[in-house]
Image (cartoon, grey):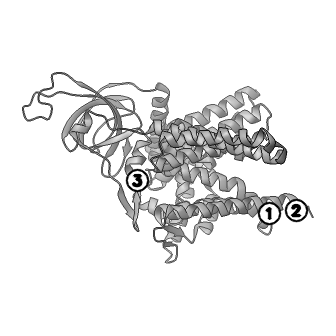
Amino acid sequence: MGSKVLWAIVLGFLVGVFARSFFPIGLMYVEGVALIAVAAPTVLLVGPARRRLAVAHARYVLLVAIALIAGGAGILRMDAAIVHDDPVLAGYIDKSVTLEGIVTNEPDVRETGVLVPIKVSALIAENSTTSVYAGLTSPEHVEAGVLAHAPLHEDVSYGDRVRVSGKLQLPQAFDSGLGRQFNYPSYLAKDGISYELSYAHIEVMGSGGNPVQKAAIYIKQRYLAGLGAAVAEPEAGLGGGITVGDKRSIGPELSDVFRRVSLVHMVVLSGYNITVVMNFVRWCLQLLPRYLQYGGLASAVLFFVLMSGGAASAVRAGAMALIAVFARATTRTFLATRILGIVAFAMVLWNPYTLGFDPSFQLSALATLGLILFTPIFSARLHWLTEKFALREIMASSLGTQLAVVPLLLYQNGQLSLVALPANLLALIPVPFAMLFSFIAAIAGILLGPFAVIVGFPAYALLWYIITVAQVFAALPFAAVSIPAFSAWLLMPIYAALGVAAVVLQGQLKNKKPR
């Protein structure tokens, strides 16, 4: 009963948040749901009706009531999290402004410029009679998140206190291809950003921020510089992606290649990457006392999440890894599905925008769910495939994750990879070794500079192989097909059918007698 109550709370809350994300559900609706949730058990479980209900039915009524209350809480949480326009900045849309604030995350360096997220705290007065600030005598307090589009040469870092000038604009949704609209304003709102500043000029006035996160970002940058000194591009970019989740490092062209063959998950700091890192750290610490081993594992996970800048996929993977470390340290049972539900609940409670508007969270959670539910099912049916080089494990996990994420990917970008399975099978085998040798190459690059190319050759060879696999499969004329846009409502019966299939097949797997 306890696990059923947990799932009633988790699923009810997530459904409430999701519904409020897309529909203007008001307080009256929440009050109605709460009234039904309280009245139904009272009417059905008290008085004459109580005798006509079996105990099992009474439990279901209570679970539904709990789910309804949790759903109402989810609606209220999303409603409270909605990002509203600042009343002062709202009057300066499409005008040049000068603002002051703090850089809230690592700037995103791209080919055409740098995207800098800034938490703005002041609108600065100017003396020019042609300025939009005419009449202001002192800085005016504002409170908003702004994404500044700055040129490549701007030298700005996380935690910097800055003064930024540019044209203030509202984010706009855009066409992502094949008739699909990407809700860019809500995507930015998940990070508290409600404005963009184009043609921005940034002046650094001081430094601040979380010292631990600053240290993590600094080490990441030094690591990437060392890797770049030891390994040539684009192999160095891939090495940075698979080890520290630097997803922009491989560039847009290679990203498209990896996306075409469904290998783009490799350059996201996911559960697989963190598991490889944890295994390596555990091996390094195996001679230390037990509490130091688990402390080192937890510290490594936290540090990697900080280096990722708090990306949703990394936070999800890191949180589950930390719980696994705690479970092992306390000799408790680790139920992956339940932990995934708890972590998803906590992340959405912290930031409700994550559920409906963060593709990395959606794909990460679905991939993990597919890995948990379907990998054992496929593994049992792939008994003919050898376990050498973890081929059966890779094939089963690839099938499980692909089955879970393909419907959402088709809805988001309409690209169906027909070579995903062979590409994943061939490319994932050397990933742990590529991560290890990339780490060694980066250290050599930091210590030896350009002389580290000899040490970096094994990493280069393995990374070249992975890129070549992706390029060869992507070049095939039938590598991927485009699917026209379809309604999001179609995803519901698809995932409902997958859920039923998982329950039925897992039941058959448990009941199957060993030969």
Q: Where is residue 355 in the image (x, y as percent from the top left)?
A: 53, 47
Image: 140 above or below 84: above
Report the residue marked by disc 2.
512
- How far across and down, in percent of the image, does residue 459 sit? 55, 52
Left or right: where does residue 131 sit relative to residue 116? left
* Residue sitting farthest toward the left: 129
Sequence order check, earlier mark of 1 and 3: 3
Up/down of 479 relative to 219, above or below? below
Secondary structure state at the residue bearing disc 3: loop
For mark 1, what is the residue?
A: 380
Q: Residue furthest top?
A: 138
The residue furthest front is 48
What amino acid is found at the position of numbered circle 2 in the picture? Lys
User: Residue under circle 3?
Assistant: 183
Residue at x-position 66% and y-position 56% = 370
Relative image position of residue 341 (x, y in whole percent):
66, 44
Viewer-proximal residue, 341 or 242? Answer: 341
